Image (cartoon, helix red, strand yellow):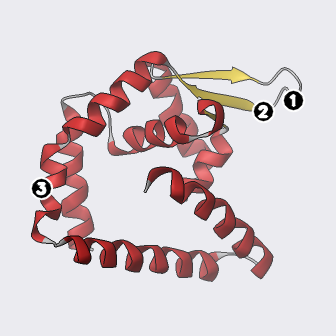
Amino acid sequence: MQARVAAYHVRRKDLLEYGVSPEQAGILERLYHSKDKTMTPTRIAELYFRQPNTITAILRNMEKKGLVELTKNLERKNMIRVSITKKGMQLRETISTNLTETRKIFDVLSDEELDQLENMLLRIRDKSIIQTSSSKFNATRRLDQIHESDGQII
């Protein structure tokens, strides 16, 4: 737990100079790798294990900064689409090449240890999803959706 919190603070400090939070940077990364650079707030909430209203607040803040665009679906009025803007793509590119302090955290691990760590963390995440899902069907569906997006950002 302390390692996660400490690493989060290093990443947060690294991102401060770009004016974004780790959550906002993660959303930019997910949008960049998604089909058509677009997702729904509900999908983003599912991927981040957050309540939709929490994600909506983050997205509105990002929209004010010009990083994303929120548009209503003309066919389904209650559905909102989140798209990464050109400014958001540029910031994502800058961030992905300049997070030096965050990368230094992992210098203490060999490549093999990094692979093992990633594998163990993914297994823990998957087991947690299964344990917190209301049914086997929901757990399987959720894992399938998350695994689909894993390949996009790992």
The residue that appears at 54% across and 78% down in the rendered structure is 128
Which image quadrant is residue 49 in? bottom right
* Mark earlier in primary sequence (3, 1): 1
Asked which secondary structure carries label 3, the reply is helix
Q: Quadrant of residue 17?
A: top left
Q: Position of residue 61 (x, y in %)?
A: 45, 27
As helix, strand or loop, the secondary structure at mark 1 comes to: loop
Amino acid on which the number 3 mark rests in the picture: Lys
Q: Which residue is mark 1?
A: 76
The residue beneath circle 2 is 79
Q: Residue at x 21, y 72 (%)?
A: 2
CB atoms of marks 2 and 1 within 8 Å: yes
- Mark 2 vs mark 1, CA separation in Å: 6 Å
Residue 77 image position (x, y, % from top left): 84, 26
Tag in front: 3 or 1: 3
Q: Is residue 125 visible?
A: yes
Residue occupying the far right of the picture: 75
Please name whichever residue, 76 or 111, is drawn nearer the observer in this view of the structure.
Answer: 111
Q: At which x and y percent is residue 74?
A: 84, 20
Tell me if residue 151 comes above or below residue 78 in the rendering. below
Location of residue 96 with respect to 103 vertically, above or below:
above
The residue under label 3 is 104
Three-letter amino acid code of the residue under disc 1: Arg
Local crowd at mark 3 within 10 Å, few (<14), some, or many (≥20)?
Answer: few
